[in-house]
Amino acid sequence: MKPVPDTAAQASAAATDDPAIRVEGLTMAYGDFVIMRDLNFVVQKGDIFIIMGGSGCGKSTLLRVLVGLKEPAAGKVLYREGSLWDAPADTRARISRRTGILYQSGALFSSMTLAENIALPLSQYTSLSRKQIREVCSLKLALVGLAGFEDFYPSEISGGMCKRAGLARAMALDPDILFFDEPSAGLDPVSAHLLDELILELRESLKATFVVVTHELASIFAIGNNSVYLDVETRTMTASGDPKELLAHSQDPKLRRFLTRGQEQQKDD
Amino acid sequence: MTRQPAPPRADAPRRDIAVADGVVTLTFSGSWRMDQTLPDIEAVRQALAASPAPQKLVLAGSGVTSWDSLFLTQCRAIIALARERGVAVDAGALPAGVESLLSLAAKVPERQGAARTVKRMPFLERVADMGYGAAEGVRNLLDFTGDVTLAAWALATGRAVFQRSQLTTLIYQASIDALAIVSLISFLVGLILAFVGAIQLSQFGAQIYVSTIVGIAMVRVMGAIMTGIIMAGRTGAAYAAELGTMQVNEEIDALRTFGFSPTQFLVMPRMIALVLMMPLLCIYADLMGIMGGFVVGVFMLKINPIQYLTHTWQSVPLANFWIGLVHSTVFGVLVAMAGCYRGMRCGRSALGVGQATTAAVVTSILAIVIATAILTVCCNIIGV
């Protein structure tokens, strides 16, 4: 049986056709072991695009392919500038200049203070003076609620704070596209909610596009306006569209189980 | 101290087997806990294998006073046995918690292919696998060497991007921090060389040549080798662990996505620090070694201190000094490369960091010894 992608919500998304990322026929593999095949989806500009799926289905790997850390086995990741994996180095640099990534663990450079962490991309890509960089760092830290923590080292602050500092660093260059790997993992419900609010605010103010890997249902429905569901058994995407629409209209039993926290049992159970 | 088997207690676990009309009834009673010796399931196997084959297995546990995971494992094993033989199981009479845990464990069927089966491959296939593995290793190493060369070229043309402040710290760690251990070890090596030489030389009154032995040995090769090995264990291991942890922590990914080359940003400063500091440490080690020999010469062999030093100065050709410096520079490159290579290739786990660190030390010491052999042959050929 070939899974049929859910197209319920694509009609509304197609109305504003300004793709930020277009994924075509993407197949990812570790050696001979194929994780996901035939991924086709479009992230529109201004979307909060959710990559969802069960544990171990390849969500984070997909993110690594999208940002240029892991080469796909086949297929294309198309940005406005061109195909990420076929582009010459300077084009790739232009693409990565426009993107920011929040890693699962924060991935702050442990040998640098928070301010130095944020300053690093700024000093690489801009010609700001030291004082201006310092001011930008303070601003970004204040935006994520860490004002005054400029000179702390990552090991001196809590995991949730590391995550927020990682977000500040991801936003350092005012990127158009922000990638989040499991933003709410390891956060308490209140902090996770605040992070969702922050993402929504940032979308309003920065007009940025967000690609979020998560399996946190509350976040998925709170922030997502487009999504793709990766199914671990068939090793491909089985649905895409607005998660709320998917919950309302999708007929796919596995997706329904996922979106309802397993409350709706599979029909053949 | 040996553990005594627990004496039988009043609440010892009991399992009675009753067979009637094709129904096997197991009645459990007593305390089924890990601190008890439990009856094994051989008797149950026999009861189930008896002919005529039983139709049904009833597990009853109303007499069980207390239980833990061990009871569960036994029930599970018995149920599996019954399933194997196609005997229906009625576990309804077990304590309520046991029954629900058993059905919880049976709820999600074992994922097909999830259990690892270790297949023993034929000998030739294993040899071929090792060969492929080695070829892959060589390719990775060449890859890394190429990366480092490109980064070094970028550095030479002033385009390499890294943090100056970090370089200062690294240089400090690779020099001042290492002084104490280098002093101690080189001093003792000089002392040992002098002792070994003194025993032979004093037999025919040539004690003064102890200074020559210690001087040439330390300056030409021992100083460089000892600093090389110390730095491999100290700094090379630290580099592997640092970069490995950064790998685990996704820091290297983060660097890459910011458009930094990890080779330029992380490997180059470490290379520079070691390559610049190793020759200096080597000179220092030479001096400390000569001091060690001096102590033996002056206090044990009663050689005049001035005479010892002038003899050292006169009998050690200057070429040896340069040879020592070449050695230590090469070792600096090797130790830094080995440490960084292992760190950059580290697996994403705590286990990976440990392996990377071990491999870094082993690789650098091996590389030091091989390089010494090659350099010695080269020196021989050009006649210095």
Image: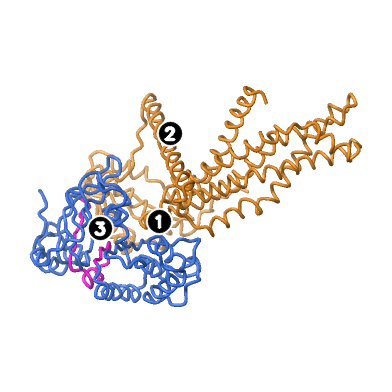
Chain colours: A blue, B orange
Say if residue A194 shows up in the picture: yes
- What residue would you read off at disc 3? A54
Q: Residue at x 52, y 41 (%)?
A: B338
Residue type at mark 3: give it: Gly
Residue B83 visible in the snapshot = no
Find residue A121 and report its horizontal and vertical position in percent: 40, 62
Which chain does the residue under circle 1 lie in? Answer: B
Q: Which residue is mark 1?
A: B255
**Between marks 2 and 1, how big is the CA–CA gap?**
26 Å
Q: Which residues are magenta?
A: A209-233
Expressed as whole percent of the image width and height from the top left, the position of residue A96 reads 31, 57
Same chain, labels 3 and 1 = no
Secondary structure of the residue carrying tag 1 is helix
B312 or A4, nearer to the observer: B312
- B77 relative to A54, above or below: above
Q: Name the residue tied to disc 2.
A: B138
Q: Closer to the camera, B285 or A200?
A: B285
Q: Which tag, 2 or 1, sits closer to the chain's start?
A: 2
Q: Chain of mark 3?
A: A
Coordinates of residue B41 in the picture (x, y in percent): 37, 45
Give amino acid for label 2: Val
* Amino acid type at mark 1: Leu
Tell me if mark 3 has few (under 14), some (14-19) or many (20+) residues whose alpha carbon lies within 10 angstroms of its own.
Answer: some
As drawn, B360 above or below A90: above
Quadrant of image for the C terminus of chain B: top right
Report helix, strand or loop for mark 2.
Answer: helix
Which residue: 20% across, 61% down? A20
- Residue positioned 29% across, 49% down in the render: B79
**Do marks 2 and 1 both belong to one polypeptide chain?**
yes
Closer to the eye: label 2 or 1 = 1
Q: Secondary structure at mark 3?
A: loop
